[in-house]
Image (cartoon, grey):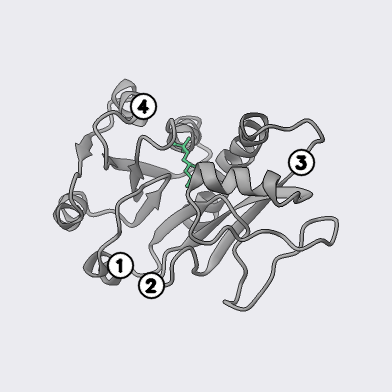
Amino acid sequence: MIRLAILISNSGTGTNLQAIIDAIENKTLKARIVTVISDKKDAYGLTRAGTHHIPTAICLAKEQLLPLLQAHKPDYVCLTGWKLIIPNDVLTIYSQRILNIHPGLIPDTIQGIVKNPDGTEALWNKGKFTDTAIQNFLTAKATYAGSTVHFLSNEFDFGPVLGRCFEKIQPNDTAETLYARLKKKENHMYVQTLKKLCNT
Ligand code: GRF
């Protein structure tokens, strides 16, 4: 059974974690969550993990991450709103095995541009954290918002793309209404991506 470590924070509410838990419990995702690690003590995802009897740990300094991971021998490390820098030793040891979800459309090449479903240029939101990124879709008057699941690399908010999702922006959207719809697509996409990696 593929072993997953899920890395969370208080920047979200653990909806991606919950989607992964649900897919494992309904047996559509063949994997096991061996640990949930949070970089903040008040992350709601810790409560979600506790409800499902999944071991949790707090990692307040980036130097603590490698030993915490190695204790659980994960095949994949899944970042869902994690905020601490991933140190180089972790990046090297888990090369092509650390997934991240970014609220922007990451291209396949560093010079590339993703197109929205209507042919307009999609926003990468490189270097923007969640709230700023969602607001940017509205401020830039984009026609679509979107998120990307990718393997982490040395380049910030870039790396081999595993999946993208789009959400059409509605005329009366606020950051809250737009993000609520995008979140549902993110949750689905993260699980679908893991199915491709784990259900072989
Ligand atoms: C996601 O929306 C992701 O795009 C961003 O952090 C959020 C985490 O959400 N990087 P959740 O905690 O999984 O609900």
Q: How far apart are the two marked residues, 4 and 3, measured between alpha carbons?
A: 28 Å
Q: Are marks 4 and 3 in contact (CB under 8 Å)?
A: no
Residue that lies at the very extreme toward the front in this rendered image: 139
Q: How far apart are the two marked residues, 3 and 1, measured between alpha carbons?
A: 35 Å
Q: Which residue is more in the foreground, 175 or 186?
A: 175
Instruction: Check disc 3: other Cα within 10 Å, few if <14, some if 14-19, many if 20+.
Output: many
Q: How far apart are the two marked residues, 2 and 4, measured between alpha carbons?
A: 29 Å
What mark, if any, has residue 44 been given in the picture?
4
Q: In the rendered structure, which amino acid carries the disc numbered 2?
A: Asn
Q: In the rendered structure, which amino acid carries the disc numbered 4?
A: Tyr
Residue drawn at point x = 50 percent, y = 45 percent: 130
Is 191 positioned to the left or the right of 42 in the image?
right
Q: Which residue is mark 2?
A: 154
Of pointers 2 and 1, the one earlier in the residue sequence: 1
Q: Could you say where residue 3 lies in the image, as x and y percent from the top left?
A: 33, 49
Q: Where 90 falls versus 135 (above or below)?
A: below
Q: Where 67 falls versus 134 (above or below)?
A: below
Instruction: Check disc 2: other Cα within 10 Å, few if <14, some if 14-19, many if 20+.
Output: few
Residue drawn at point x = 57 percent, y = 76 percent: 110
